[in-house]
Image: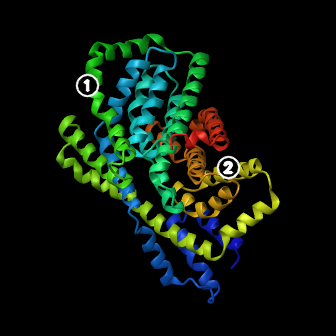
Amino acid sequence: MSIGILFIIFVLLLIIAIPVGIALGITSVLPSLADPSFTVGAKYMVRAMFGGLDSFPLLAVPMFVLSGIIMAKGGISKKLFDVFAYFLGNRTAGMPCAVIVTCLFYGAISGSAPATVAAVGSMTIPILTELGYDLKFTTAIVAVAGGLGVIIPPSIPFIMYGMASGASVSDLFIAGIIPGLLIGILLMVYAFYYCRKHGEDKLRIQTEVQKLHDRSLVTVLKDSFFAILSPVIILGCIYSGVASPTEAAVISVFYALIISLLVYKSIHLKDLGEIFKEAIRTFTPILFILAASTAFSRVLTLMQVPQTVSELISSNFHSKIIILFIINAFLLIVGMVMDTTPAILILTPILLPIATNIGVNPIQFGVIMVVNLAIGFITPPIGVNLFVAASITDVSVMDIAKKALPMIGYFLVALVLITFIPALSLALL
């Protein structure tokens, strides 16, 4: 069976709404069914699937998922927003900028873009709407800024890329800091432009900010201190060498439980059962996709797909700039139609050799790949962030997408800078 036919079948399975994990499993066994001489059989596939799950770094994923859910149920996003609104609220676009910074910090807790949108959006969208901001704009900025959740460390996609490439997860986390901050700053620049152009209800905003000021800075900081400290502890443990990313993920769960149960008392012991159930429901599909992606990537390797694609590109294109533009365009398209986890696990073995052949550092390429796929979170037809945001406000996905287009443009500007300025990813290493 040819490579082209295999990919066509895979795409057709996705089009008819076959779950990604099942589609990967089916396409993994097709070559052996079509050609009995093919060295990969069903038993090999099963071993490959279980082998793909036998990974210590993988343990970090369910822990960060659980930690993010605990933080969301504990109302941590509201405490983060209050402190940023206190300092930024009275400035032009201060409230939208406070939302973006909240997404940055919450992304450093959850490691997930949809989780960031759900936690921050459900709390901030009603507030900004009451302050006179356009509902579509507010929903769009939360959906787009939520994409920072997979770029700012700790990031679940970075863990997946580390598994697929063998790159250091700790280095990937460090490499994501400057790109995440850059994208956040660019989004704030757009928010400033939008608010200058369309105006703001200054009286309402000042009234809301005054409520925070009436509580006093000490009270606001006291209420949000442990929430702000959360990413500091998680990342500090990793970067100081005290804990590996997996161990830091476990620490984040215990920290989330302690501050939510004992400090803020925003959840109770009776809530833990439902929280654990939600974490299981969230992680189980990821686990199945991971297992099937591992088997599929083994099949692609045996069919020499990475070598074939590498030779095809290198024989037709000789400019590093053109090759990087092609890779970025391809990843942007993939991000629109495929979830991040299978995209990383399938494409890393194919694209990473091409990138390294033209002198791109594997860590930098990991950042490039994740930023591309983060844009996929906010672009139809998949656009998970758009659907999550739409479920909060009942604004249609297409209306959110239209409002998000200029912000996606700023995201793309950041992508170009990250692609062609390696220091943005590697300076802190």
Question: Which residue shows up at 63% across the image and 89% down it?
Answer: 37
Vertical placement of residue 379 versus 139, above or below:
below
Position of 361 with respect to 207 (left or right) is right
Q: Disc 2 to disc 1, how far (Cα)? A: 44 Å
Q: Is residue 19 visible?
A: no
Determine which of the numbered discs, if any, sits on residue 49 in the image: none
Q: How far from the left and from the top, in percent, is residue 418?
A: 62, 41
Upstream in the sequence, badge 2 or badge 1? Answer: 1
Vertical placement of residue 266 versus 162, above or below:
above
Neighbours of disc 2 within 10 Å: few (<14), some (14-19), many (20+): many
Q: How far from the left and from the top, in percent, is residue 205?
A: 43, 15
Which residue is nearer to you in this view: 373 or 352?
352
Position of 358 with respect to 175 (left or right) is right
Give the colour scheme of this rendering: rainbow
Position of 70 with respect to 425 (left or right) is left
Q: How far from the left and from the top, in percent, is residue 345?
A: 54, 62
Disc 1 secondary structure class: helix
Q: Amino acid at mark 1?
A: Lys
Q: To which residue does mark 2 refer?
A: 328
Q: Quadrant of residue 190?
A: top right
Question: Which residue shows up at 38% across the image and 12% down it?
Answer: 207
Question: Which residue shows up at 30% across the image and 36% down it?
Answer: 75
Q: To which residue does mark 1 refer?
A: 222
